[in-house]
Amino acid sequence: MKAFLFDLNGTIIDDMSYHEKIWFDLLNNELAANMTWPEVKSNMYGTNIELFERIFGRERFTSDEMKALSLRKEILYQQEFLPHMQLIDGLDTFFEKANNENIQMAIGSAAIPFNIDFVLDNLSIRHYFKTIVSADDVVLSKPHPETYLKCADQLKINYADCIVFEDSPKGVEAAARAGMNAVAITTYHSPKDFEHLNNILFFVKNYTDKNLEQFFN
């Protein structure tokens, strides 16, 4: 094992409930989607543009309209979440251990750079990551494996030598399709949500879990 590949939202920060709230308000109160909370949650994967197209079809909004809605949604999310921003428990120590043992690290996220920069710069953790693959860097988002394949290719690490850290079933599926094992973080989904996947090494609530010690000498 030579590399750790991290999703961002729900994996480095516990922020998915904030995304869910903003999406629920935007989709229902402004765009009249008439969706339940579970329906909103089940559609929260991939890029924002993909989410709009999944819910409303491709003809409802122009590309520029979707981009504007997407940016406004992220601005609202950032305003809501910033006072609560912190690393998931134990992750500061985990990053330090990995860095001290020369384990390469990357971020592979469906977030746009605007949101990735928001997290990395506010938490001052950019220096840990050798490469970052965002929504702008791929053609097909998770569960397609492109995001994690690109991370590994840019790190010049064999796919089988990467461990993916993910909070979502779609993300773990992307890892599986890339030939990578995963650690599932249960910030937003329960283990039951992952039962159809067989590449999970174990589940953790946060990065204080003793199972993670096996990755270090």
Image (spheres, rainbow, N blue to C red):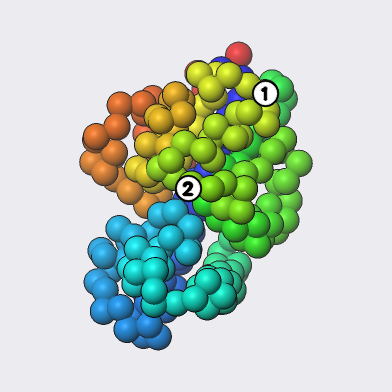
Q: Residue at x 44, y 77 (%)?
A: 61
Which part of the image, by quadrant, shows the C terminus? Answer: top right
Q: Residue at x 48, y 58 (%)?
A: 47
Residue 118 shows in this picture? yes
Height in image: 4 above or below 171?
above
Residue 90 located left or right of residue 180: right
Reading the chain from its start, which is encountered first: label 2 or label 1? 2
The kind of residue on which mark 1 rests is Lys
Q: Residue at x 50, y 32 (%)?
A: 164
Label 2 belongs to which residue?
141
Which percent across, then down, holds residue 62?
A: 49, 76
Residue 199: name its quadrant: top left
Which percent across, then down, holds residue 131?
A: 69, 38
Which part of the image, by quadrant, shows the N terminus? Answer: top right
Identify which residue, 25 or 150, lies in the foreground.
150
Height in image: 43 above or below 5?
below
Q: Residues within 10 Å of mark 2 (few under 14, many from 20)?
A: many
Residue 82: name its quadrant: bottom right
Height in image: 217 above or below 54?
above
Q: Residue at x 24, y 71 (%)?
A: 36
The disc at residue 156 is 1
The kind of residue on which mark 2 rests is Ser
Q: Residues within 10 Å of mark 1 (few under 14, many from 20)?
A: few
Extreme residue toward the front, this view: 59
Residue 215 located left or right of residue 191: right
Q: Secondary structure at mark 2?
A: loop
Height in image: 165 above or below 112?
above
Residue 25 shows in this picture? no
